[in-house]
Image (spheres, rainbow, N blue to C red):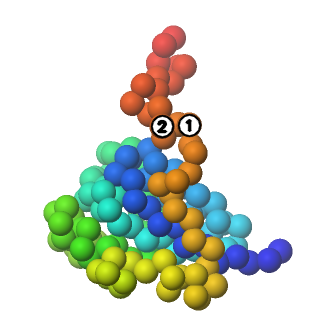
Amino acid sequence: MMTRKVAIFILSGDAACFGHALLKALEYYENGDEVKVIIEGPATNLIRELADPEKPFALTYSNVKKLGLIDCVCNTCSAQLGALKSAEEQGLLVCSRELEHPSRSRYIDSGYEVIDSSTHSCTMCRTWDTFEPYWIKQ
């Protein structure tokens, strides 16, 4: 089995999209791949929210953190959106590179396949607000 290097940039502030990106990070990790998660944009707000174990995807977020898969949280975005203190309190690396945001080229130059979670086509994420699981209807 060939080990891949995958950098997942999470930008969406939508909890379902964020959670699905984290699940993908865990999937790559469990397959033996080297994974780095980079959190920026509106997604930085969710690091504060998901510190609450009662929130959806909080356990997934906790597992990703414990495994050390979060490579950095954007300094500029987290500061602008009020999540910088939470990132620091959680012991997450806060970084800024190119134009004060994490650099995709740094990961590409290091041999990583870059995945931008905001461009995936997850039907669940696009319909989350109107989604009602079948078991609730019963």
Q: Residue furthest right?
A: 1
Q: Residue at x 80, y 77 (%)?
A: 2
> Residue 74 sits in which quadrant?
bottom left
Q: Between 22 and 79, which is closer to the camera in this rendering?
A: 79
> Residue 62 sits in which quadrant?
bottom left
Q: Between 121 and 89, which is closer to the camera in this rendering?
A: 121
Residue 108 vs 58, above or below: the answer is below
SS under mark 1: helix
Q: Which residue is mark 2?
A: 126
SS under mark 2: helix
The three-letter code of the residue at mark 2 reads Arg
Q: Which mark is residue 73?
A: none
Q: Residue at x 71, y 67 (%)?
A: 31
Residue 129 vs 48, above or below: the answer is above
Position in image of residue 85 (x %, y %): 17, 71
Q: Residue at x 51, y 82 (%)?
A: 105
Position in image of residue 4 (x %, y %): 70, 76
Label 2–label 1 contact, CB within 8 A = yes
Q: Which mark is residue 123?
A: 1
Position in image of residue 28 (x %, y %): 64, 66
Q: Residue at x 33, y 77 (%)?
A: 101
Classify mark 2: residues with Cα within 10 Å, few (<14), some (14-19) or many (20+). few
